[in-house]
Image: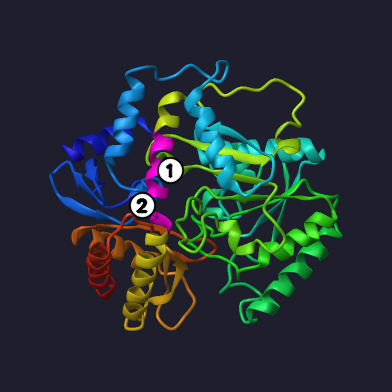
């Protein structure tokens, strides 16, 4: 049955729509931190639909809210008052840390970042954007134009002038050998030099932890130092929290809070986990920025009642059960367990991350050269052992991405680490 479905997939869908595994997997249902395939095999899910199943598969509180809302009305568009949308917007605005915040809902992180770029360029009357090397911000035309990861950037055409800044990757690049303070100083000097060669950009967009790039991040405080330079010139700071938001990093509710010394971002984008599988994205911005558009705009599917009901139920569950604290505690144990394994596996260059957002970078032993074949081997062996993980990386890197639902238990973390250890030792 799976082979037949794979043949149909290949016949009707684009070649560039990649699938994991030599024998592609059809996931039919899930519960908690586990999923099952069409053959009935059970897997511990350490990737959560690319960080989207944030709390748990088939979470009763979310499925009940969706079913009840669907029984009333599924959709009406933003042309009508929408109580669930207003209620979720109120909660997100309050949690955002942005003063006088306004919230606009979209259907994805890509669309959220598109909206943030629209707001920033309109507000600043500039189409120049600063972005980070190794970054990823979505698959639309404008989002691809600011993506600093060649593997996910299929065209150089763009409506924007994009300038790339150092700093998103701590352990590679020209400043890797510096200590954290000198690293930040060097990146700030690079930013100042770059700004001296161009007209004032509209904004800097940055992921606090780069997701597709392999869960890389700068030292805490880098974006606070950047913000001081940007603020002097009126340049906006957009924090792309599509993967880092809602407490996944454990230490903070938003990734930008690791860089909070100079205040919150001007714009925050979010998506993925808030819907726990339902299609929700959004933008939070100060009122003067959000309200700067001088033409009509609506969202047909952004903020639809059934997705907002899911978001409200999911956010309530996350806060009431302190899943941020669980990510910090269980994620910390998992990182340390994987580091102890890595010390005995020559292919592992680094285990990095925070909370339940962990990257395991693989290289050819004794070098800094990427080992994509090794990453594929581990992916396959982990699946054979009953564990699903992700892949990522950029500019000659190969990284395993580990991001389980944030309700992961200590026992499940130990189980997954043991499976991953066997997979890593199989290289």
Q: Is residue 155 visible?
A: no
The number of discs equals 2
Residue 307 highlighted magenta (yes or no): no
Residue interval drawn in magenta: 310-324
Of the pair 408 and 170, the residue shown nearer to us: 408
Closest to the camera, between mark 2 and mark 1, is 2
Please give the name of the residue rendered at 29% of the width and 65% of the height, measured from the top-left corner.
378
Identify the element where label 2 is drawn: loop
Q: Which mark is residue 100?
A: none
Up/down of 6 relative to 41, above or below? above
Magenta stretch mostly in which secondary structure? helix
Please give the name of the residue rendered at 49% of the width and 64% of the height, measured from the top-left corner.
251
The mark that comes first in sequence, 2 or 1, is 1
From the top left corner, tell me how far across and down residue 269 is, in percent. 58, 44
Of the pair 282 and 131, the residue shown nearer to us: 282
From the top left corner, tell me how far across and down residue 155 is, in percent. 60, 44
Q: CA distance from mark 2 to mark 1?
A: 10 Å
Q: Which residue, given by chain and number where applicable, does mark 1 sit on?
A: 315
- 10 Å neighbourhood of mark 1: few (<14), some, or many (≥20)? many
Q: Which residue, given by chain and number where applicable, does mark 2 sit on?
A: 321
From the top left corner, tell me how far across and down residue 50 is, in percent. 40, 49
Please give the name of the residue rendered at 56% of the width and 51% of the height, measured from the top-left corner.
136
Left or right: 357 with respect to 254? left
From the top left corner, tell me how far across and down residue 3 is, in percent. 20, 40
Up/down of 335 relative to 62, above or below? below
């Amino acid at each position: 049955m799976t082979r037949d479905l794979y043949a149909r997939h290949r016949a009707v869908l684009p070649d560039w729509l990649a699938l994991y595994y030599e024998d592609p997997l059809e996931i039919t249902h899930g519960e908690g931190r586990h999923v099952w395939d069409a053959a009935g095999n059970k897997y511990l899910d350490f990737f959560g639909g690319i960080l989207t199943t944030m709390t748990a598969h088939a979470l009763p509180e979310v499925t009940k809210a969706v079913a009840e809302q669907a029984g009333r009305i599924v959709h009406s568009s933003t042309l009508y008052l929408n109580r669930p949308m207003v209620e979720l917007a109120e909660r997100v605005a309050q949690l955002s840390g942005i003063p006088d915040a306004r919230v606009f809902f979209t259907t994805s992180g890509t669309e959220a970042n598109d909206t943030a770029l629209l707001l920033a360029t309109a507000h600043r009357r500039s189409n120049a954007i600063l972005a980070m090397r190794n970054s990823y911000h979505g698959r639309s035309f404008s989002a691809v134009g600011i993506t600093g990861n060649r593997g996910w950037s299929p065209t150089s055409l763009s409506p924007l002038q994009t300038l790339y800044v150092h700093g998103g990757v701590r352990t590679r690049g020209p400043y890797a050998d510096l200590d954290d303070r000198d690293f930040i100083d060097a990146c700030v000097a690079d930013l100042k030099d770059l700004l001296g060669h161009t007209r004032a950009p509209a904004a800097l967009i940055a992921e606090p932890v780069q997701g597709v790039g392999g869960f890389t991040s700068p030292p805490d405080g880098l974006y606070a130092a950047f913000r001081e330079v940007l603020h002097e010139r009126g340049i906006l700071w957009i924090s792309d929290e599509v993967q880092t938001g809602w407490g996944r990093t454990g230490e903070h509710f938003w990734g930008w809070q690791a860089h909070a010394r100079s205040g919150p971002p001007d714009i925050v984008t979010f998506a993925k986990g808030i819907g726990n599988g339902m299609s929700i994205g959004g933008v939070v911005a100060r009122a003067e920025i959000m309200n700067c558009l001088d033409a009509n705009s609506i969202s047909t599917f952004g903020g639809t009642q059934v997705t907002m009901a899911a978001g409200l139920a999911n956010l309530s569950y996350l806060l009431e059960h302190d899943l941020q604290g669980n990510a910090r505690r269980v994620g910390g144990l998992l990182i340390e367990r994987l580091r102890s394994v890595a010390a005995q596996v020559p292919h592992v260059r680094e285990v990095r991350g925070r909370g339940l957002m962990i990257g395991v970078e693989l290289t050819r032993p004794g070098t800094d050269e990427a080992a994509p074949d090794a990453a594929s081997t581990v992916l396959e062996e982990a699946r054979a052992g009953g564990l699903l993980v992700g892949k990522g990386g950029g500019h000659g890197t190969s990284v395993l991405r580990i991001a389980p639902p944030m309700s992961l238990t200590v026992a499940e973390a130990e189980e997954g680490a043991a499976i991953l250890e066997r997979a890593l030792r199989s290289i």
